[in-house]
Amino acid sequence: DIQMTQSPASLSASLGETVTIECRASEDIYNGLAWYQQKPGKSPQLLIYNANSLHTGVPSRFSGSGSGTQYSLKINSLQSEDVASYFCQQYYNYPFTFGSGTKLEIK
Amino acid sequence: QVQLKESGPGLVQPSETLSLTCTVSGFSLTSYSVSWVRQPSGKGPEWMGRMWYDGDTAYNSALKSRLSISRDTSKNQVFLKMNSLQTDDTGTYYCTRGSSGFAYWGQGTLVTVSS
């Protein structure tokens, strides 16, 4: 199975700041990577697919980048509504696997 | 619009079988695949398996011996059955739709395994 190592586990930042979350795959996943946002008590919501494509309706302050085994999610100009947990997921190979998550809080 | 909704028992006894139903609307099961994903409280999600649009299935190897996914296209429903449940099977179970990432999720159903 492909292991997804996500960092950091938690993150505290100020409103308006830029934050970056990293995800490392145990082998090349050829950009088969998605990022999700999950608020407490809610289902995950797709933000980014194919490593760098913005899902419909997602604000442009979210962006994804990376290749091979290293990927990142960047949130520009942090807003209060961005407080959530974020997960990466590889869908290059079965079984699809998720990272353990990053909990983002406002400082 | 696309909707998915999970239903099933909230409480299951250890060693028993879990049966969940995902009822979909706004799309056809013969055109799109549906996956089951579960999430223990406070942890990352785990992909369990997929029902393809052509009726084929794919399973997480870690669960394959206990898991079965089927469907009834006439009722727009996808079913999950998993046997020999243990306490670490407790969590929220979701059905989802998507290929390059899961763009649509149900609200989830909490399953607690306890005597």
Image: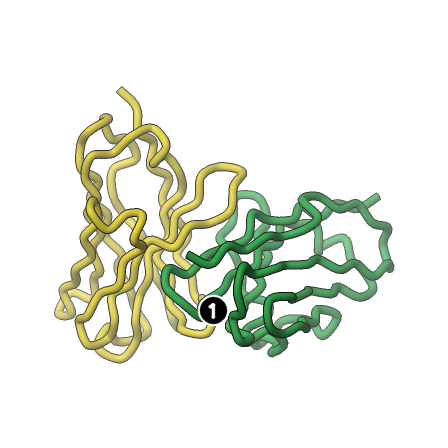
Chain colours: A green, B yellow
Q: Label 1's element?
A: loop
| Foreground pick, A10 / B108 | A10
A6 relative to B85 in the view: left or right: right
Residue found 30% across the figure and 23% down from its top? B114
- Quarter of the picture containing the N terminus of chain A is bottom left
Residue B25 against residue B20 in the figure, above or below: below
Looking at the rendered image, the quarter that the C terminus of chain A falls into is top right
On screen, residue B14 versus residue B88, left or right, reads: left
Q: Nearer the viewer, residue A23 or A10?
A: A23
Please identify the residue farthest to the front as the structure is shown.
Answer: A27
Measuring 49% from the left and 53% from the top, which residue is drawn there?
Answer: A43
In the foreground, B113 or B72: B113
Q: Is residue B62 visible?
A: yes
* Residue A18 drawn at (x, y percent): 83, 61
Q: Residue at x 60, y 67 (%)?
A: A69
Above or below, B13 against A7 in this view is above
Residue named by callout 1: B101
Residue at the (21%, 40%) spot, across then down: B18
Percent of width and height locating residue A53: 60, 78
Instruction: Name the subunit of mark 1.
Output: B
Q: Could you tell me the amino acid type at mark 1?
A: Gly
Does residue B5 appear anywhere in the picture? no
Residue A92 percent across, percent down from the top left: 45, 70
